[in-house]
Image (cartoon, rainbow, N blue to C red):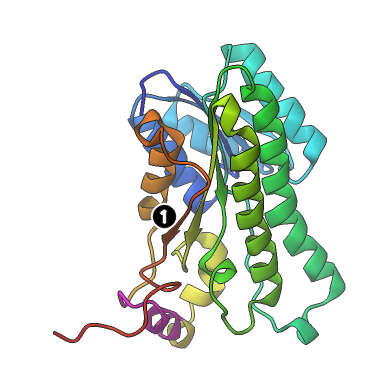
Amino acid sequence: MAENGIYAVLGATGGIGSAVCRDLHRRGARVVLAARDRQRLDALAGELGGVDVESIDAADIEAVDVFVRGVVERHGRIDGLVNCVGSIVLKSAHATRPEEWREVVRSNLDSAFAAVRAGAKAMTKTGGSIVLMASAAGRVGLPNHEAIAAAKAGVIGLAQSAAATYAGRGIRVNAVAPGLVDTPMSAAITGNPLMLKASESMHPLGRIGRPDEVARVITWLLGPESSWVTGQVIGIDGGLATVRGKATG
């Protein structure tokens, strides 16, 4: 991670988003935080010190455009943009209400499209890196994940297509696809001992992930260390999407 690089984080106050912000800040980058909850934004900014914050709805395409343009106007450029916005809905299709479906698509796919659209326009002359949040559920069939799987599979398609579109401009687009991570958003699962045990057993490494484990990969994808990586979907999932069974020695 280059010192003094300019990086913007959408969904900065979430479990993974805040871990990304901390990792970028620790590495000497200049970080701009965006999320809906101003109070949580201010708390994170106070913890880090010396960062800009803006309260926006990351699924609002025009709002994200304005936000990213503002980053460029204030700092002269933007080197990387990551969208950490998302949601979890674990329901079968027939049990999912129409409003739940629309919110899943809005929070996961609309926000990803907004990030790509704004980031591509801002980086068209300078190049840069855009990282999107997919999910293991978008790569492998899991029961009761229909809505979130559809939205996250859309994120994967978006990342790969955008990587092809903007490669000639030096803009890299990648996605990470975590398994279950211990964040406030997953508290309904991790706070239930039976559900937590079942979730741990689904991951071949026998546990769920930590936010910092995902954040480190995102930070790498944002920075120049990954300068020859684009159009990739990197699983950070304890083997969930690709490995079957556990080694017993």
* Residue bearing mark 1: 211
Q: Residue at x 81, y 34 (%)?
A: 62
**Image spot of residue 36 (x, y percent):** 69, 43
The quadrant the C terminus occupies is bottom left
Position of 60 with respect to 112 (left or right) is: right
Q: What stretch is highlighted in magenta?
A: 196-206
Name above or below for residue 225 compared with residue 153: above
Q: Nearer the viewer, residue 21 or 159?
A: 159
Q: Which residue is drawn at 69% across and 81% down?
A: 91
Residue 115 on the magenta segment? no
**Image spot of residue 5 (x, y percent):** 44, 21
The quadrant the N terminus occupies is top left
Q: Which of 141 and 21 is in front in this view?
A: 141
Name above or below for residue 232 compared with residue 30: below
Q: Which residue is drawn at 37% across and 76% down?
A: 243
**Image spot of residue 157 (x, y percent):** 65, 55
Image quadrant of residue 234?
A: bottom left
Principal secondary structure, stretch drawn in magenta: helix
Residue 198 on the magenta segment? yes
Q: In the image, what residue type sits under mark 1?
A: Pro
Q: Residue furthest left?
A: 249
Name above or below for residue 88 compared with residue 219: below
